[in-house]
Amino acid sequence: MVRLRVAVVLSELRPGGMERVVVHLVKGLVNRGVDPIVVCMENAGALAPELEEAGISVHAIGSKKSRDLGAVLRMYTLLRKFKPHIINNHDYASTPYTVLANLLAIRAPVIFTSHGLLFEGFEGLRKRYRFFSKFFSGLSAVSGQVAGRHREYLGWGGKIAIIRNGVPEMERDPALRGKVREELGCEPGDVVFLSVGNPRPEKGFEDLVDAAMILRNEMEQGIHFVVAIAGKMNGSDYCQMLNHRVQSKGIQSFCRFLGFRDDMKALYSGADVFVLSSRSEGLPMVVLESMMAGLPVIATRVGGVPDAVGDNGLLVDPARPRDLAEAMKRLLADAGLRKTLAEKAAEEARSRFGVNRMVEGYLDLYQKHVRDRRR
């Protein structure tokens, strides 16, 4: 029996949520007897070594510009050599190259997976991506809300398979907890609110900063907390605004940007509550990971978050720092509620958002489209 060959395409294996989905997916496919390769249109990226150590091929096309004919030809050569039965494209930027190279090479079915809600910068490209979407064999999405947004954006009239993100099981480590809390300068009774994400406007970190200030002004004497935000800071206007906001409010002693971190298990171990302040999301991996790690979750009602969290956490409307602060205050003062929500979140994550369930969903979708193509 011929092993199913799958080419998974994205821009780069950066340290982001969508990219971690790809890593978990591809490793899971190997465990199911599938032969995958990962094609990165730009560089391989920071997450590539994890796949390479598992014996999975990662190919960097090295495209550095738009309308790069050389990148199309390099991808064409790669596809002709590998001969995938199906191609799974995970972002819009790489879509034109995937479609053109595939048309030249083998004309395998192309599945596009939509991960987010297209917060900004996509409207001007709508005609381009609607054109290339005509060459998709199918679409999948990480949540119903994401499916609806991409259906409207692409004018897609066909079915969209909903395949929720999956995360591996995770146990918090007491030794790592102590190390992280020492780094943050925490006292034994301090509550650590953790948030994770590369700072961009849709992450709403200014709302979390404002909520931290509100909470600090209203907290009871003797109750202390730290807000730790992990994610790669850069020289963007948004990052500069965040730094200025923290400095101008004088809250840098308990509201800190940690920068890029590759020790997520340690951060989840050191935290007491996970906070998502986003104004737009698909189905964020960090929420699922924190639930799997047994953290109570406070999150905004965006994208697939309400469905994932449900009654197993506290939900607030986006762009409402006061509401966010009230939810944080509630968990800060009630250790029993933190414990109850943490246990419920972990149970929910294990039952609905495991990696195996996600991989089976993609594998079923691939096999369906391969069968349809053979008819």
Image: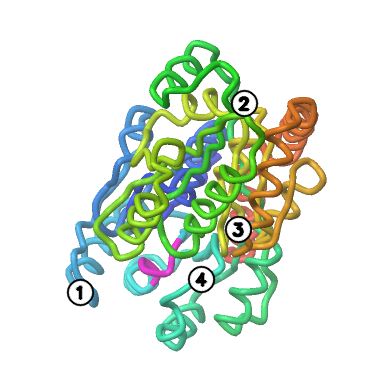
Please report the bounds of the magenta region as a residue range. Answer: 91-95
User: What label does residue 222 carry, if any?
Assistant: 2
Q: Earlier in the sequence, mark 4 or mark 1?
A: 1
Identity of the residue drawn at 42% across and 52% down: 249
Q: Left or right of 301: which side holds 127?
A: left
* Badge 3 element: helix
Q: Residue type at mark 1?
A: Leu
The residue wearing badge 4 is 118
- In 3D space, how far apart are the residues under numbered discs 4 and 1 (Cα atoms)? 26 Å
- In 3D space, how far apart are the residues under numbered discs 2 and 3 (Cα atoms)? 23 Å
Q: Residue type at mark 4?
A: Leu
Q: Residue type at mark 3?
A: Pro
Q: Residue type at mark 2?
A: Gly
* Badge 2 element: loop
> Closer to the camera: disc 4 or disc 3?
3
Q: Earlier in the sequence, mark 4 or mark 2?
A: 4
Q: Left or right of 354: which side holds 180?
A: left
Q: Is residue 67 visible?
A: yes
Q: Are marks 2 and 3 in contact (CB under 8 Å)?
A: no
Check the picture and name the quadrant holding the N terminus. top right
Q: Is residue 266 placed above or below 370 in the rendered structure?
A: above
Residue furthest bottom in the image: 127
User: Main structural element of the magenta stretch: helix, strand or loop?
Assistant: loop
The residue wearing badge 1 is 69
In the foreground, 125 or 255: 255
